[in-house]
Image: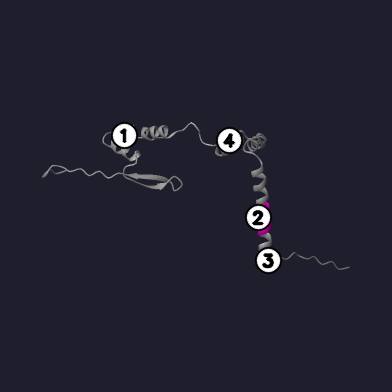
Amino acid sequence: MNTRLRTPRALPVTGLHLVATLALLSTNAAFAAGNAAVMSAKARLQHDRVACSRIRDQGERDECLSEASTLYAGTQPSNPNENAAQLMRNALKRCEPLREPDRQDCVLRMQGQGTTTGSVAGGGIYRELVTTEVGEPGAKP
């Protein structure tokens, strides 16, 4: 009896195969997202801590626990005791290390004078205040 060994051939990838594969992958992702949404933040933290405790390497375990805590903290609401006056005091504290006249310009920018562009999401807020000083006639800088 002759036995022939067949080597498996790859199926040609067609649009239908690609769509089916993507549908299966997205179903799995949606199912996983649904499970994560059902699990409360506190329960998720406990689950992650248990998973981290199984890691043998101390450094990796510490990093895992830190990431779990950070994820949990991100789900918590901001401090309800914060108020506008406290936020303004914090903004003005940023100006304290500066020397005059830079400190006064900083205070004016923090109080909303000048122009503000950018965003935190974009990488930073840029505040600009242009001050024109008129010198004595004939004086050279």
Residue 13 visible in the snapshot: no
Q: Nearer the viewer, residue 54 or 43?
A: 43
Q: Nearer the viewer, residue 59 or 135?
A: 135
Q: Amino acid at mark 4?
A: Ser
Residue 34 visible in the snapshot: yes
| Whole-number angstrom distance, CA of label 3 to CA of label 1 | 65 Å
Q: Position of residue 100 (x, y in %)?
A: 26, 34
Secondary-structure class at tag 4: helix
Q: Which residue is mark 1?
A: 98
Quarter of the image where the N terminus is located: bottom right
Q: Which residue is mark 3?
A: 16
| Whole-number angstrom distance, CA of label 1 to CA of label 4 | 35 Å
Q: Quadrant of residue 139?
A: top left
Quarter of the image where the C terminus is located: top left
- With 76 as the anchor, is 6 left or right in this view? right
Q: Which residue is mark 4?
A: 69
